[in-house]
């Protein structure tokens, strides 16, 4: 099974900060990685798919990148609506694995 | 716009089978463009993939749940379903259904809490 190691587990930041969240896959997954945002009591919302493609309607301050088995979600300028929990998810051979999640808190 | 809605019992007894249905509106469940999945989230914890069903009926399940899970599609009702047998308290979670495309969950239901308790 492919494992996804996401870091950090918690991140304290201020409005306007540049924020970076990382996921590392235990083996190659090509670009089959997605990022989601989840707010309390709500379903996850897709932000990025195929490592770097922005889902329709998602603000351009969100971006994704990949380098080998390391994947990064960047929020260029944190906004009040961005305080939430973020998850990565890999897709390989029709199976999924999620990262443990990163909670972005107000500093 | 595709919409998904989970339904089913909110309380299941230990050792029994958890059965949930996801009703799809705004699109056909038979479309070759869409695939369908179930994901769950125990209270206060992270997301866990349960399994997916693809156009043509192929199913793929989490290795840790594979022996207890069945996902099926009812095209006449535009629904897909989850059965999870021999449940324990560890199966208490919010269960989400999702439309899958390109390996990602594009549209999600609002989620339904299922509690396993006698």
Image (cartoon, coloured by chain):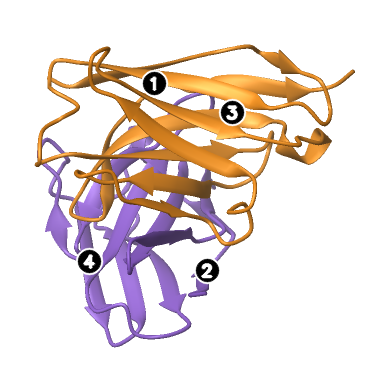
Chain colours: A purple, B orange
Is there a contact, CB below 8 Å, between mark 4 and mark 3?
Answer: no
Q: Which residue is mark 3?
A: B94
> What's the chain of the residue with tag 1?
B
Question: Is residue B77 shown above or below B68?
Answer: above
> What's the chain of the residue with tag 4?
A
Query: In the image shown, does B35 or A82 lie closer to the viewer?
Result: B35
Disc 1 from disc 3: Cα separation: 13 Å
Quarter of the image for the C terminus of chain B: give it: top right
Disc 4 from disc 2: Cα separation: 16 Å
- Mark 2 residue element: strand
> What's the chain of the residue with tag 2?
A
Disc 2 from disc 1: Cα separation: 33 Å
> What's the chain of the residue with tag 3?
B
Disc 2 from disc 3: Cα separation: 24 Å
Labels 2 and 1 share a subunit: no
Which is in the foreground here, disc 4 or disc 3?
3
Q: Which residue is mark 4?
A: A51
Q: Which residue is mark 2?
A: A7
């Amino acid at each position: 099974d492919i494992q996804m190691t996401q870091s950090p587990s918690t991140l304290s930041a201020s409005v306007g900060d540049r924020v970076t969240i990382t996921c590392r896959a235990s083996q190659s997954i090509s670009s089959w990685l997605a990022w989601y945002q989840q707010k309390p009591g709500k379903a996850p919302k897709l932000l990025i798919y195929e490592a770097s493609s922005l889902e329709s309607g998602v603000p351009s301050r969100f971006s994704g990148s990949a380098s080998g088995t390391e994947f990064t979600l960047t929020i260029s300028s944190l906004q009040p609506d961005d305080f939430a929990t973020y998850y990565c998810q890999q897709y390989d051979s029709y199976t999924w694995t999620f990262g443990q999640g990163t909670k972005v808190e107000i500093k | 716009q595709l919409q998904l809605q989970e339904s089913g019992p909110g309380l299941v007894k230990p050792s029994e089978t958890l059965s949930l249905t996801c009703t799809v509106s705004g699109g056909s469940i038979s479309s070759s463009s869409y695939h369908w999945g179930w994901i769950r989230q125990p209270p206060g914890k992270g997301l866990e993939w349960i399994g997916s069903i693809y156009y043509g009926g192929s199913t793929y399940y989490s290795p840790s749940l594979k022996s207890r899970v069945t996902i099926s599609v009812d095209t006449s009702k535009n629904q897909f379903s989850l059965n999870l047998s021999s449940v324990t308290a560890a199966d208490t979670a919010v269960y989400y259904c999702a439309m899958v495309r390109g390996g990602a969950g594009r549209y999600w239901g609002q989620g339904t809490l299922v509690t396993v308790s006698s």
